[in-house]
Image (cartoon, grey):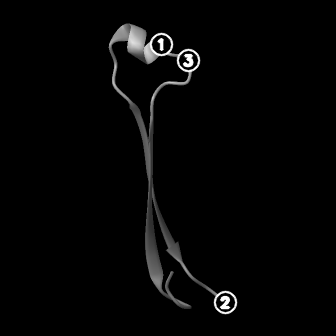
């Protein structure tokens, strides 16, 4: 998590099948949602 004044990078990835089944009907794979956050901890 880091201490005060450290710069920390958080990588968040969510992989899932489609919610409605449309992906399977169209022959598509899973959805992947990915975000990278860089935060500097302060007091």
Q: Nearer the viewer, mark 2 or mark 3?
A: 3
To which residue does mark 1 refer? 22
Look at the image and tell me in which quarter the C terminus lies.
bottom right
Q: Residue at x 33, y 25 (%)?
A: 29
Q: Residue at x 48, y 86 (%)?
A: 6
Q: In the shown orientation, is residue 4 left or right of residue 16?
A: right
In the displayed structure image, the side of residue 20 where residue 35 appears, left or right: left
* Residue 33: quarter of image: top left
Element on which disc 2 rests: loop
| Residue on which the image places disc 3 | 20
The CA span between labels 1 and 3 is: 6 Å
Q: Nearer the viewer, mark 1 or mark 2?
A: 1
Residue at image coords 42%, 17%: 23
Q: How packed is label 3: few (under 14 Cα within 10 Å), some, or many (20 or more)?
A: few
- Between discs 1 and 2, the one toward the N terminus: 1
Which residue is located at x 51 percent, y 80 percent? 1
User: What separation in Å lies between label 2 and label 3 (alpha carbons)?
Assistant: 44 Å
> Residue 24 appears at what percent x and percent y?
40, 15
Q: Describe the element under mark 1 as helix, strand or loop.
A: helix
Q: Contact (CB < 8 A) between labels 1 and 3? A: yes
Disc 1 to disc 2, C-alpha distance: 47 Å
Say which residue label 2 marks.
43
Q: Secondary structure at mark 3?
A: loop
Q: Quadrant of residue 26?
A: top left
List x then y, in percent, for residue 25.
Answer: 41, 8
Other residues around mark 1 within 10 Å, as few (<14) / some (14–19) / many (≥20): few
Q: Earlier in the sequence, mark 2 or mark 3?
A: 3
As rendered, which of 17 and 9 lies closer to the eye?
17
């Amino acid at each position: 998590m880091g201490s005060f004044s450290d710069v920390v990078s958080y990588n968040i990835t969510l992989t899932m099948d489609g919610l409605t089944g449309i992906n399977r009907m169209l022959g598509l794979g899973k959805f992947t949602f990915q975000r990278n956050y860089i935060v500097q901890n302060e007091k």
